[in-house]
Image (cartoon, rainbow, N blue to C red):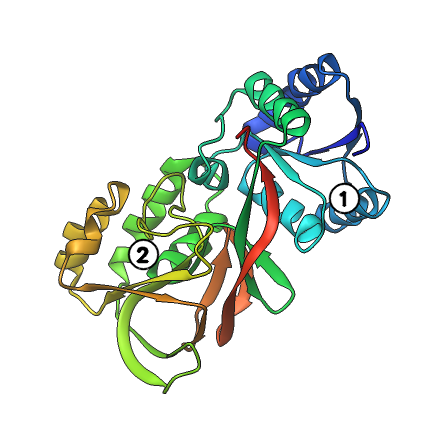
Amino acid sequence: MTSEITLFVNPTAGRGRGAHAAQPAASALRDAGFSVRTVLGEDADDALRRAREAVAAGTGALIAVGGDGLVSLALQAVAGTATPLGVVAVGTGNDFARALGLPLRDPAAAGRLAARALKEGGHRDIDLGRVGDRWFGTVLASGFDSRVNDRGNRMRFVGGRFTYDLAILAELAAFRPIPYRIRLDGGGAVETEATLIAVGNGTTYGGGMRICAGAEMDDGLLDVTVVGACTRTTLLKVFPRVYRGTHLDHPAVTVHRVSSIELAAAGITAYADGEPVGPLPLTATCVPGAVRVLTGG
């Protein structure tokens, strides 16, 4: 294993925490004897190109310093390769790191964990979801939740989880069940009305909302949470339970475990790892053991 490690940094993550987090993470890695180089990008496309170049050049690990958006970019560079991924989670949501039990907003601890994992072989091979050539590590959202994302991205006057909560309230005013067509594991197409359909490789999105609370990241399957058609009043009662994962017991909610799912619905944009993937229809598949993550054992 090469001793050169690449820090893949989003300086704007977590309202500027990314820039400050790189230094203690790098110091922890250097103290452990690793050579550290930093990769920044002028924009997402440039950052991804640079990360892929580092992986192709044989870096010992790609360490993502930022939030779920940067982790998502890092996954595009390392998935399907032998290069391990480390995460220094300093973003707003940090759902990928949360699912793996990694340090949150503690860059020095995250750097020490990555260094120890590299020296001692502490890692975990996990599954990823895939839509076309796009990989995702946590949850693919479609329906009410993706519309909330759409609205939240247009709200510039607030930030963090408060933005998400305000966007939920705004979307509730225009709430209507959505006609879907779904196909599980290549079976027959099913027409159904639903509030949302979430496809989870990991358990959470939106900064800890346990929409796919039973998902395992190394079972070779995706958890599909279907919140069926319901009234606005029912949705108001059910949605707060997502933070604890107890919504799965509600009669309006069903869960499927599949290796692939086809989703179609008019006027719906899917989001994966909090980033827009594109409009439905789409097919999401589980790719077992697609990435090696530094976890410290």
- Residue 276 shown left or right of residue 193 in the figure: right
Q: How crowded is mark 1: few (under 14 residues within 10 Å), some or many (20 or more)?
A: many
Q: Foreground residue, 273 or 179? A: 273
Question: Disc 1 marks which residue?
Answer: 51
Q: Foreground residue, 183 or 280? A: 183
Residue 63, located in which quarter of the rendered image? top right
Percent x, y for residue 269? 48, 66
Percent x, y for residue 224? 35, 63
Q: Distance between the residues labelled 1 and 2?
A: 37 Å
The residue under the point 50% across, 68% down is 284
Disc 2 marks a residue whose amino acid type is Glu
Name of the residue lying farthest toward the bottom: 188
Circle 1 SS class: helix
Percent x, y for residue 89? 54, 31
- Residue 49 shown left or right of residue 146 in the figure: right
Question: Disc 2 marks which residue?
Answer: 171
In the image, residue 296 above or below residue 168: above
